[in-house]
Amino acid sequence: MERKNPSKDGNKPRKPAVRKAADENARVHKNLEGFQIGINTFGEISSNFAVERINEFLNKNVPDRRLTDSGPESGTEAAYETAG
């Protein structure tokens, strides 16, 4: 049984979905302007910012849900304390 090709001309297979170009920069906070991150061939995360700088930014600008009971997973702190 022959399969019909869903492409318009019937001879060429469909092209894969188009991805964004790697050159396009994502919108970032003004303090992280120029920040780039990637994964090398060994699976290691590489960045042009030091980890300390990223952690400093996160500590200043992102609230830690573990320190408040208002997070969506409230009550999980006790589970971490008893498990470890």
Image: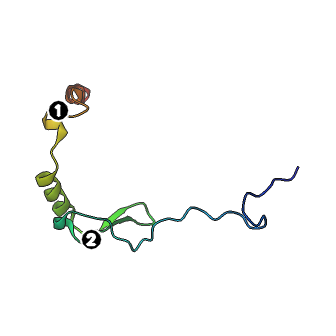
Q: Which mark is residue 18?
A: none
Residue type, numbered disc 1 = Ser
Name above or below for residue 79 compared with residue 71.
above
Q: Position of residue 68 (x, y in %)?
A: 13, 34
Q: Left or right: 70 with respect to 16?
A: left
Depth check, mark 1 against mark 2: the one in front is 1
Q: Which mark is residue 48?
A: 2
Q: Are marks 1 and 2 in contact (CB under 8 Å)?
A: no
Q: Quadrant of the C terminus?
A: top left
Q: Quadrant of residue 14?
A: bottom right
Q: CA distance from mark 1 to mark 2?
A: 34 Å
Q: Position of residue 31 (x, y in %)?
A: 16, 66
Q: Secondary structure at mark 2?
A: loop
Q: Position of residue 17 (x, y in %)?
A: 56, 61
Q: Quadrant of residue 50?
A: bottom left
Q: Position of residue 49 (x, y in %)?
A: 23, 68
Residue type, numbered disc 2 = Asn
- Residue drawn at x 37%, y 65% is 38
Q: Left or right: 59 with respect to 22?
A: left
Decide: few, some or many residues near mark 2? Use Cα within 10 Å; few <14, some 14-19, many ≥20.
few
Q: As drawn, which residue projects farthest toward the left?
A: 60
Decide: few, some or many residues near mark 1? Use Cα within 10 Å; few <14, some 14-19, many ≥20.
few
- Residue drawn at x 13%, y 52% is 59
Q: Which mark is residue 70?
A: 1
* Front residue of this view, candidates 73 and 82: 73
- Residue drawn at x 33%, y 70% is 25
